[in-house]
Image: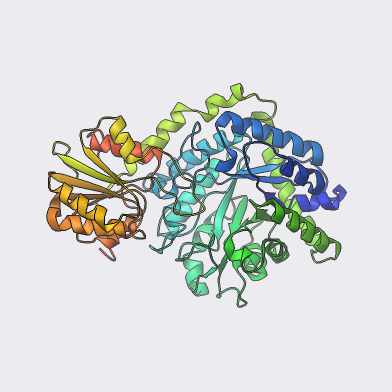
Amino acid sequence: MKDIFKMTKEEKIGQLVWVGFQGYEFNDELKYLIDKYKVGNIILFTRNIKDIKQLFELNRKIHEYVIEKTGIMPFISIDQEGGMVTRIMDGATFCPGNMTLATSTTDNAYQIGKIMGEELRALGINFNLAPSLDVNNNPNNPVIGVRSYSDKPEVVGEYGLNYIKGLQSTGVIATAKHFPGHGDTNVDSHKALAAVMHSQERLENVELLPFKKVLGETEAIMTAHLLFPAYETENVPATLSRKVITNLLRERLGYEGIITSDCMEMKAIADNYTTPKGCLMGLQAGLDQVMVSATYEKQLKTFELLTEAYDNNLLDKNEVDQKLVRIMKAKEKSYALMKEYFYGKEFSDVVDIIDNKEHKALASKIVDESLTLVKGNNLDIAKKTLVIATEPFATTIAEDELSNRSIGSVIKEQKINVDVERIKVSIDEEKIKELVNKSKNYEQVLVCTYNANMFTQQADLVNELYLGLEDKLFVLSTRSPYDLFKFKQIKNYLCLYEYTPNSVNTLAKYLKGEINAIGKLPISLSRQC
């Protein structure tokens, strides 16, 4: 690795920025950014992934080219949280999401982190933008929800710590996010700028507690594009606030690792500051790295602005060098394991690590055991049953369409002895009437909801069905357990915490009587139910 004091201006700035690109191939735009601006950090999305062989070959090209042009190993990152935020959907293990994991043991959180790290490392990915350490204390949060382990900060901290230890045991860097905490908002920062209005005392005891738990372990922390008036009296989000990043996280809490931004193209930043200016303000505030994950033109303008700021001393050169010390230290640590497990390998050498039956079996087992009977009774599989199920759906920009493998299609494929009706998350009144009439021909009805607390037409369906069915109606939420708040009177309620290939298979096993609902709620529903 290079001595930072021998690095050119372009090489230094190139280490401070993450860029994404479009398509499955190493393209000319990415090549130009590396050639001219010495980009040292690449973020991948589902748009870049066709299959695991293509991904392996793509990452090998990126590694080779970046090292050739800069002499420094690149960071290649991905949002592989598990559950609802998963980028590598086929071939590799589809790992459980955080709330699903919190129904299991902390040792399984470690094991899933380790599995994820081993597979990412074999693919050439050395930086995972996970886990979310947000405390899920707002049922109406549109972007966190089941991406959180729990509504209890101690639980979030404990599971997050174990996951981080497992992931980083493989040499893949973990990223605790979204500091100081994105749990208690009802606005998605991809779409707008929101505020968390709690006092410092409350923030210290709830939102910050999980981060404090992992400060000595996690090698990276990602900031939130949110206002925190308790720490920053100016109308500036945490990502751009020196009081939050430098005074609080770096100095008072003593964090020594990399502090990176969420994407600066998110509307909370782009609409209020512009992406390039947001990147400059973030670095001035104390961020080590900033992210421009999608738009080539914005990436070019960002590099132009940062170069001009460096030349004009608007970026403190001593602080830039301090950032580089942290970045290069992390790269050197990761490089040792990447050299052993990725460099010089062919896809045939690593495919059994990535497409691993034992890994997949553990992930499936954890999801099976997460199925939770919150109240009432289980289905009687001997009775004539109608299943009404939503189709897969991405509710936020953070997610991707997970799979064409829906509940309805799996019921048909496996010839399970139930009838099935597929519905959209936003169901119209005519369809509700049709299903209410159809339900009269069945001994029991199972409705599989998907964020019915937000897509309330599903709740309208459940409430209409309840009038005629009462204890013959069963509801199973396939994402947010808070769906129950919209139909508290129902007698039989079950939860899964993700709508993924694993959870669809779990439901199929339940409908066939192969598994029981043995999971325990990782959150509290008693306050409203």
Report the residue at 55% width, 75% height from top: 230
Q: In which quarter of the image is residue 55?
A: top right
- Residue placed most toward the observer, 386 or 119: 386
Q: Which residue lies furthest to the front in this view?
A: 430
Report the residue at 34% width, 55% height from top: 426
For residue 289, side relative to residue 472 (left or right)? right
Report the residue at 62% width, 64% height from top: 269
Q: Residue furthest top?
A: 348
For residue 127, side relative to residue 200 (left or right)? right
Residue 312, percent across and down?
A: 85, 65
Report the residue at 21% width, 37% height from top: 418
Q: Quadrant of residue 335?
A: top right
Quadrant containing the C terminus is bottom left
Quadrant containing the N terminus is top right
- Residue placed most toward the observer, 97 or 140: 140
- Residue placed most toward the observer, 423 or 198: 423
Residue 441, percent across and down?
A: 12, 44
* Residue 124 visible to an observer of this rendering: yes
**In the displayed structure, would residue 177 be above or below residue 235?**
above
For residue 430, side relative to residue 160 (left or right)? left
Residue 390, percent across and down?
A: 33, 47
* Residue 517 visible to an observer of this rendering: no
Residue 128, percent across and down?
A: 58, 45
**In the displayed structure, would residue 216 be above or below residue 359?**
below
For residue 269, side relative to residue 470 (left or right)? right
